[in-house]
Amino acid sequence: MSNQGEIFLAGASRGVGREIAQRLATQLVPVKALLRSEAAQAELEALGISVVIGDALNPAAVQRAMTGAPIQAVISTLGGLPQDGQRADYLGNKNLIDAAVQAGVQKFILVSSIGSGNSRSAIPPQALEALAAVLAEKEQAEHYLIESGLTYVIIRPGGLKSEPATGTAVLTPDPTIAGTIHRADVAELVCKCLVSNQANNRILSAVDRNMTYTQTDFEILTLD
């Protein structure tokens, strides 16, 4: 992937998205963040990130947000609580994917979740039941991205914690692995996937190798 253009980041107001924004800002990578409200705007702009206000559930707003400077990659960590009965997990990501195709984006990194698609067997039945609606939408978004023709990376983190990075998080193509991972470590893995081709067009689970629930011996993807 070339270094031309900026990174378009959706979901930067909190969680993994905020961690990604901070990491890219320290690497002096040009970032444009799509925010639904102005709440996090000042903090992100203080990091040197350009902010555009728009709702990911509005296709026209997303297309407008992606106009201007060339975009080399889109990163989406969209999710969270439904707004007016609609989740962003599928519709928001669909709008981002459509706009990315139109804008000629080189790579799209989607942060999904363990439990989606063929990783559903990795989490307990009670958790699957509780998360059924959101996981169904995440799986739908994954399929839509795969079929879009974009170069994609789908990262499915395990249970998320907000503690500092451990540096022992890994990506695995094994969909049966589950465990926990710190949000800062997910952000580090996402940023590595921006500049590595090893994860291209793959679906990968993200866990901390020291915090897996069962297996301790599994295939690890090298990003160097």
Image (cartoon, rainbow, N blue to C red):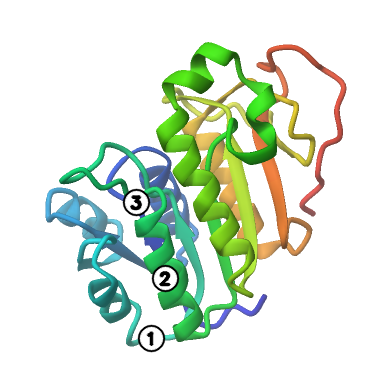
Question: Left or right of 163: which side holds 72?
Answer: right
Characterize the local packing of mark 1: few (<14), some (14-19) or many (20 or more) Cα atoms within 10 angstroms: few
The percent position of residue 71, horizontal first and vertical second, equals: 46, 79
Which amino acid type corresponds to the residue marked 2 in the rendered image? Pro
Question: Left or right of 60: which side holds 191?
Answer: right
Q: Do the residues labelled 1 and 2 touch (CB within 8 Å)?
A: yes
Looking at the image, which residue is at 43% across and 41% down?
Answer: 16
What secondary structure is found at the residue carrying circle 2?
A: loop
What secondary structure is found at the residue carrying circle 3?
A: loop
Looking at the image, which residue is at 45% across and 49% down?
Answer: 20
On residue 69, which mark appears? 1
Q: Which of marks 3 and 2 is in front?
A: 3
* Residue that sits furthest to the left in the current view: 38
Question: Left or right of 221: which side holds 28?
Answer: left
What secondary structure is found at the residue carrying circle 1?
A: loop
Looking at the image, which residue is at 32% across and 63% down?
Answer: 33
On residue 30, which mark appears? 2
Which amino acid type corresponds to the residue marked 3 in the rendered image? Gly
Relative vertical location of residue 46 with respect to residue 81 in this rendering, above or below: below
Is residue 8 in view? no
What residue would you read off at disc 3? 11
Relative vertical location of residue 184 with respect to residue 18 in this rendering, above or below: above
Characterize the local packing of mark 2: few (<14), some (14-19) or many (20 or more) Cα atoms within 10 angstroms: some
The percent position of residue 93, horizontal first and vertical second, equals: 42, 59
Task: Report how far apart the C-alphas of labels 1 and 2 lie in the structure.
Answer: 10 Å
